[in-house]
Image (cartoon, rainbow, N blue to C red):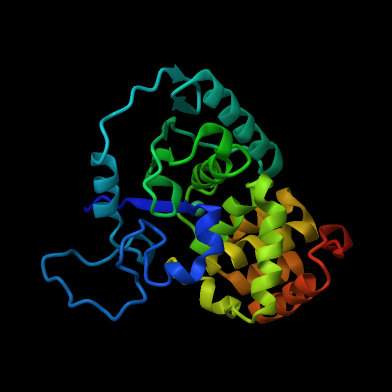
Amino acid sequence: MRRLLLLLLSLTLAAALTAPAWARICPKCGRNHLPDLPKEQPKPQQPPKEDAAGEDKSKEAEAAQQEEPAVTLSVARARFFAPSVEVADEADRILDRLEERYGKPRVWHAFPIYYKRYKGDGVAGYTLYSQPEVKEVVIFETFSDSVGATLDHELTHAFFFYFLNSNFDLFLNEGLAQNSEYRRRESLRQTVYRRYSAEQFWELDKLYGRNRYDGSLLIYHQGFSVVDFLIGRGGSLYFAAFMTQLVRTNDFDGCLRSFYGYKDIKELQAAWHAYIETGQNRATLPAVR
Ligand SMILES: [Zn+2]
């Protein structure tokens, strides 16, 4: 059985603000092989794809791992290996906060956290996993830049991989990770409003279940905002329960109905649009009952 490696990425804010320039560049790796390009000729030697989200990722992951020599991680903690006490202390704080917010994962395998030199390709970090464990978290920012931003983002991916024991929908996955970037939350809300007003957003049913990155970061911006909205309605623990049920049943409409009272994704979209139009203020949202 082919080992399936999956890669989740976060992009620099600079890349997010210059989205049109990335229209033909893969947000996963900065290379020019966007999934939206016309279909390549099928390669007969390749085994069938197991999961759209895993597309091309084994090669990328191997390349990413081979590009730089191994770094010694001197600090071992229960949940990870880190290059310094400073990084380890911050990672522990972030993971403690995630546990407090969403609940405690039942299983956990420690993984390495690397800091590497930024490659200039817009990729700020990635999380690589292959069942049953997270293989590595890599950050391409300085430590101080990554706190409240990319380190929180990538550790959120790692956390939810264990919490849900699953590689779940990419739209919600990136939305959750973006919500952990507390230093960027307000600028993200401004980006959401600007892009919504400019009518750049897609219908939600084109993003949920797509499991591929798009060329203009909609999966990040809309994912952030929808998760922000749903957490605003019922809180983080409630959202974690919703996600757990969703992964168990794979019934998005059914889970929306039983947790949030929307009959389907269209009804969610209408309520979420109203949230954007009225200022994205969680405090004004009606609580779920
Ligand atoms: Zn991500």
Where residue 56 appears, as percent x and y from the top left, is 28, 60
Q: Is residue 114 visible?
A: yes
Q: Is residue 173 visible?
A: no
Vertical order, 69 against 152 (above or below)? above
Vertical order, 64 against 19 (above or below)? above
Where residue 133 appears, as percent x and y from the top left, is 40, 40
In the rendered structure, the answer to whether residue 150 lies left or right of residue 130 reads: right
Residue at the spot 29% in from the left edge and 48% down from the top edge: 61
Residue at the spot 18% in from the left edge and 75% down from the top edge: 42
Where's the C terminus, which quadrant? bottom right
Where residue 146 appears, as percent x and y from the top left, is 55, 39
Vertical order, 181 against 207 (above or below)? above
Residue at the spot 70% in from the left edge and 37% down from the top edge: 100
Along the viewing direction, whichever of 260 and 153 lies nearer the viewer: 153
Vertical order, 115 against 186 (above or below)? above
Q: Quadrant of residue 222?
A: bottom right
Residue at the spot 66% in from the left edge and 41% down from the top edge: 103
Count of number-bearing discs: 0
In the rendered structure, the answer to whether residue 64 lies left or right of residue 262 reads: left
Q: Quadrant of residue 286?
A: bottom right
